Image (spheres, rainbow, N blue to C red):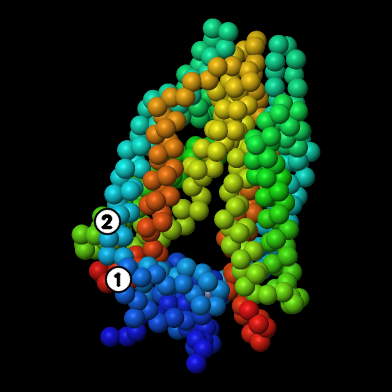
Amino acid sequence: MPATRMACPSCDLLFNLDTLQEGQSASCTRCHAFLTTRNANAFANVASFATTALVMLAVACTFPFLEFNRAGFENATTLPQTIVQLWVNNMPGLAALTAAFILVIPAMVMLLLLVLNLALMQNNYRTWVKPLANWVFHLISWSMAEVFFVGVLVSLVKIAKMAEVTIGISFWAYAAFCILFVMAISQLDRFQSWQKIEHLT
Amino acid sequence: MPNSTALEENLAACHTCLKLVSVDTGQCPRCGSTIHSRSPNSLQRTLALLITATLLYIPANTLPIMYTDQLGRTSESTILGGVVLLLKLGSYPIAAVIFIASVMVPLGKLLAMYYLCFTLQWGNPGSQRQRTQLYRLTELVGKWSMVDVFVVAILVALVNLTGIIVFRPGAAALAFAGVVITTMIAAEGFDQRLIWDHRRTVQP
Ligand SMILES: [Zn+2]
Ligand SMILES: [Zn+2]
């Protein structure tokens, strides 16, 4: 069997990973970049974090996110309504950007990771596995769920001065989604995923 | 014996799936991506995107990012104006968040990426490891600049009580989103392995 080798994605130095034991991680000796982790449960972990994350996102999209109350006027909005509001008020650019970065891309990443990791877990190869893996690794850096959440906190402080704001269930669900998203990504390993895909082909 | 790089062994790592193949391979046998030892024209593309981002940075900071219609009066605020307003209101932590995310991060990221491009072109006495760390930092913090754009989106969508208070987005919001997106693409297209290719004799 040929040696399992990997070039550091950050500085191109070659490493032999044959001696890497289960549970161990490797990083580059020259530039300290993370290389890979051997973890037999990684695929299952990604799948379960992604499932929970998707449930949380569904909750976050269904119930009121923030309730705004001033002088008897009430405004309760869900997350999708927030985006629709931007759209109908003639701000298609802002609406599209927000929708993509805080809902569509994060949801896509979790859904694609769930499907991919289920396939890898069950050792069955499908022709769509490769294009799917190709896509999902490019999409990850464009998810801005956690950035949006900080934006929400900043907005809360700004509005607090002018009206009464009630935090809805969706606020907490979205917070949970952000955490689960990060946990799923932290278990994801590009090198191991592709090794597995090659193994299945 | 110290390890050698993939290039020194006439190998190339696929940029998509990390598979090691011979440099003259056209397409990756594993994922089908085109194989390049180093991203072609990485430096030129990154610089072109950086210049675009720099040009967008001007309207993003000079035009208003948000208009506030309150009790028949309209006021506008730029990004820096918003920070000053928060300071006046005494919201120091929030002012700090916005200042770091909207002023320091985009500016620092642009400068860092220019620095990385120029040191590749003309060599650099500084350490390669430090430059790699600088690159990783710019990659890590890049998207956090979108905070202010999201704040505008939330305020505009949520607080909409005609006659009492209405927020409207200014042109700077989209320009600023443009700065963030172009610098993110610029950083993604920058081939960090180039930092280590030149001057192998320099101590890391
Ligand atoms: Zn390295
Ligand atoms: Zn490949």
On screen, residue B189 above or below B148: below
Residue at the spot of label 1: A22
Which numbered disc, 2 or 1, marks the residue closer to the eye?
1
Residue shown at the point (27%, 72%) measured from the top left: A199
Chain for disc number 1? A
Q: Residues within 10 Å of mark 1 (few under 14, many from 20)?
A: few
Locate residue A79, reporting x and y percent: 46, 29
Front residue of B126/A63: it is: B126
Locate residue B144, reporting x and y percent: 59, 46
Residue A68 got which mark? none
On screen, residue A55 above or below A33: above
Residue farthest along the bottom direction in this orientation: B1
N-term mark: 2 or 1: 1
Residue farthest along the top direction in this orientation: A72
Locate residue A109, reporting x and y percent: 40, 49
Locate residue A74, reporting x and y percent: 51, 12
Q: Quadrant of residue A164?
A: top right
Residue A52 at least partly seen? yes
Q: Secondary structure at mark 2?
A: helix
Residue shown at the point (24%, 60%) measured from the top left: A121
Residue at the spot of label 2: A44
